[in-house]
Image (cartoon, helix red, strand yellow):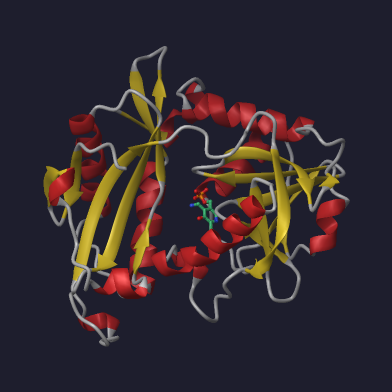
Amino acid sequence: MANKKIVFFNGKFVPYEKAVVSVASHALNYGTGCFEGIRAYWSENRKKLFVFRLRDHVRRMKRSAKTLFLKLLVSEKEFCQVVVELLRKNKPKEDTYIRPLLFKSEEVIGKFDLRKLQDGFTIFTVPLGRYLNTSQGVKTIISSYRRVDDRTVPPFAKPTGIYLNTALAKTEALEKGVDEAILLNLDNSVAEGSAENIFLVKGGKLITPSLDQNILAGITRQTIIELAKRELNMETVQRKVMSKELFSADEVFLTGTGAEVAPVIEINRKKIGDGKAGKITARLQSLYFQIVHGENRKYSRWLTRI
Ligand code: PMP
C-alpha cells in the first residue's frame, strides 16, 4: 500500500519489502504503539512539495511516546531531517501522507511491562488525495460507539490500539450510508469525528470541544483557531459541547490532517444550516488550502519545502 519505495525502518532507509515485523510482535498483538499523520502537498504551479507543520507533528509524537513508554531515539531536529530525506528519496509528485510509527516490536506474548519492551520505529509515505468530500461536504451520524475516555487509554497520545474505536465508528457510519461518524463522550458531550476534530459556528462564534474532552489536540484544529482569530477576527470558545447543540448550529465542520477542513451538511439525517457548506467554513477552508499549497506567504513558516 505504501508507495513501495523507500521506508525509514529502525534507523536505516530500506526498500519497502525489507521493512517487516514479526507476527509475534507486541504491537501487532496488543496495539502498543503510537503514530503521527503528516501531510505533504504537491504544488503543480511551483513544482514543489510542502510539508505542513512538520515540527508540530514531531513534537506531538515526542509527547505521545513519553506517555506510552515508547522510546523515540531521535531528536526533534533529526526526526524532521529524516522525513525530509525520505521525501527526497521517494520524490512524490502528488499529495502524500507521511506515517511515522513507533511501536513495541519485541516478539513476546504475555509481557506487559512497557518499560522493558523493545521499540521499533518506522516512517513510510503513501499517496493521499481527499479523505473526505471537502467540496460538497459530508453526511454524518452520531455513533453508537463512545469516544475512548482518557481514564482508560489516553486518546491524546494517538495510540495505535484505540484506532479500533475509530474503525468501528467509521464502519458503522459507512454501513448506514453516510460518510463519517461523530463520537460522544460517556456523558453525551461531543468529543470529535472518528479521526477529526469538530467545530460549530453559532452566532458568529466558533465553538469546539476543549482539550479535556477526550480529543486529540489536533494540529489542524489549532491552525483553524489561529486563522479564525487572525484572518476573520473570530474567537473560538473551547468548552464542553452537548450533542443537542450540534443540531442548532449554523454550521458544523471537521478538521484533520487527512480530512482537512470538511463541512458537515447532515447529522443523523437532519440538515445542518441549509444543508450546504456554510460561509465561515468555506472561508476557513479556502485559507487553509491556500496556506498548505504554499500560496500564502504570511504562513510560510508552517511549511517545509522539499
Ligand atoms: N482526532 C483524531 C482521533 C485523529 O485521529 C485526528 C487525525 N490525526 C484528528 C483528531 C485531527 O488531528 P490533526 O489535525 O492533528 O490531524
**Residue nearer the viewer, 125 or 204:** 125
Quarter placement of the N terminus:
top left
Answer with left or right where residue 250 lies relative to residue 283.
right
Residue in view at x 62 percent, y 50 percent: 174
Quarter placement of the C terminus:
top left
Task: Give residue 48's position: percent from left, percent from top.
Answer: 34, 20
**Residue nearer the viewer, 69 or 176:** 176
Residue in view at x 61 percent, y 52 percent: 197
**Residue nearer the viewer, 125 or 139:** 139
Answer with left or right where residue 151 lies relative to residue 55.
right
Residue 237 in sight: no
Q: Reply above or below: 206 against 154.
A: above
Task: Give residue 13's position: percent from left, percent from top.
Answer: 13, 45
How many labels were placed on the picture? Answer: 0
Q: Reply above or below: 290 against 242.
A: above
In which quadrant of the rendered view does residue 161 lie?
Answer: bottom left
- Which residue reaches farthest top? 45
Residue in view at x 19 percent, y 62 percent: 21
Task: Give residue 214's position: percent from left, percent from top.
Answer: 59, 68
Answer with left or right where residue 141 lies relative to residue 88.
right
